[in-house]
Image (cartoon, coloured by chain):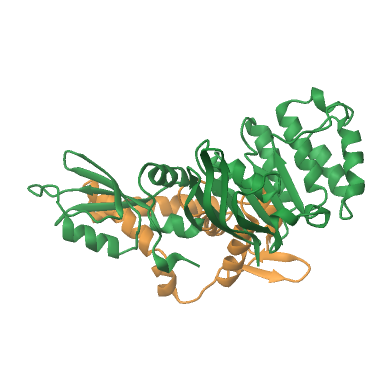
Chain colours: A orange, B green
Amino acid sequence: MLPFSIEIRPGLPIAEQVLFAVKKAVVTGQLRTGDKFPSVRILSQELKINPNTAHKVVAQLVDEGVLVTTPAVGSVVAALALGDKRARAELLGPELERAIVEAKKLGLTAEDVQAAVAAHWRKLSDSSKP
Amino acid sequence: MNAIETTGLTCRFRQLEAVHSLDLTVPAGSVYALLGPNGAGKSTTIKMLMNLLRPTAGTARVLGVDSQKLGPTEFARIGYVAETIDLPEWMTVRQFLDYCRPFYKKWDVELEKTLLKKFDLPPERKIKHLSRGMRMKTLLLSVLAYRPDLLVLDEPFSGLDPVVRDDFIRGVLEVSSLGNWTVFVSSHDIEEVERLADWVGLIDQGTLKLAEKLDSLQQRFRRIEITRASGISTPTRKPAHWQGWEEAGALTRFVETRYSSGETEKLCAEIFPGANVTAQPLPLREIYLSLARGDAVPEPASSLR
């Protein structure tokens, strides 16, 4: 079993979906600093995905500082990166835009959206506490 | 290095041209899915690659060797699985594996044992008494055990139940070693293929309509939905790369085959002033259907690699 939740859907590139799932798991506390991350082989077999894709995912996660690779141990989850906050906020751009477009379509106001965001924020913060 | 390379590969049965001047390139280390409807020429292509069928014209190189000169050295590095392969029906599964083992220097007894357990195969049962799924698993086991460099699977999933299919895919991934392991698979099962493949070839009526990296295919196809502003009628100008045009009320829907974030939106805004535009990624299944129905859309040169 993989130590994070994921359900692969057809359509979006697999690598993107796995990357997103892992980052989400880190944010919600399913994966904690120092946890062992599955190897490329395990990832590929469990998700039934191309080993090249699995390799790409792990490389990207190491690149982004989500994982650190240590010889003999393999990959482990890194301490939450504290880099440039604005740069990290930009990562959210496309997701925010999508949410705002949907909100406008539904006729919601900025306040409605903020309230919804706050509610979701609380929900995820609660579940990440040990 | 390419694991498979064909130039002008053609196969004619009397009047029928089953495969027409196929130029196929399967890079080493890729999982290449050959998709196409029944009778498209998938199996014929594979049989030519495996030297079971002589091409009428053209050539194929498999692992760097002319397909018509493939011999024991090459076949020890190739694993070929197809439903049409004859098995010695009177042997038990164990006898069959005992029989195969001496042919391969690289045969991995440990892997054989692991897979036998994983595949849940009855070693003492005669092959003629195996179910279809067990048969396919036995065959797969007999090729995976020598860890082939090239795995050629002809319609491996058809008629397998979900559990067996899962076993099958896990088995295939079991021997994967990054970099030099190539899989060439023909299939109908687009959902399974979408997870596994990094290259997709689409063949129809013996002709290769498209060969592209799955990534780039998924990047350039989007379902566009446009809610036209009131008073704006449907335009007369439709770019050729917009396909499968549908309209109902204020809604226009089509498939953009050359999506590029920003560019597409700009073009939509020019053609449909003031409209609300959404772009959704397409599952491979939808891409396949859109390609199979419409004319093949040549990929933009920039996506070729």
Q: Does residue B257 appear to the left or right of B36 in the view shown?
A: left
Q: Give residue B300's position: percent from left, percent from top.
A: 39, 64
The answer to whether residue A5 shows anywhere in this view is: no
Residue nearest the viewer, comparing B263 with B238:
B238
Q: Does residue B133 appear to the left or right of B76 in the view shown?
A: left
- Residue drawn at 14 percent across, 57 percent down: B273
Residue nearest the viewer, comparing B27 with A102:
B27
Q: Give residue B51's position: percent from left, percent from top.
A: 71, 48
- Taking the view exactly as shown, the residue that stands out farthest to the bottom is A84
- Taking the view exactly as shown, the residue that stands out farthest to the front is B14
As drawn, B143 above or below A34: above
Count of numbered circles in the view: 0
- Taking the view exactly as shown, the residue that stands out farthest to the left is B231
The answer to whether residue A71 shows anywhere in this view is: yes
- Taking the view exactly as shown, the residue that stands out farthest to the top is B129
Q: Does residue B213 appear to the left or right of B117 in the view shown?
A: left
As drawn, B171 above or below B123: below
As drawn, B209 above or below B303: above
Q: Give residue B182's position: percent from left, percent from top.
A: 67, 56
As drawn, A64 above or below B253: below
The quadrant in which residue B29 appears is: bottom right
Q: Give residue B231's position: percent from left, percent from top.
A: 7, 48
Residue nearest the viewer, comparing A1 with B62:
B62
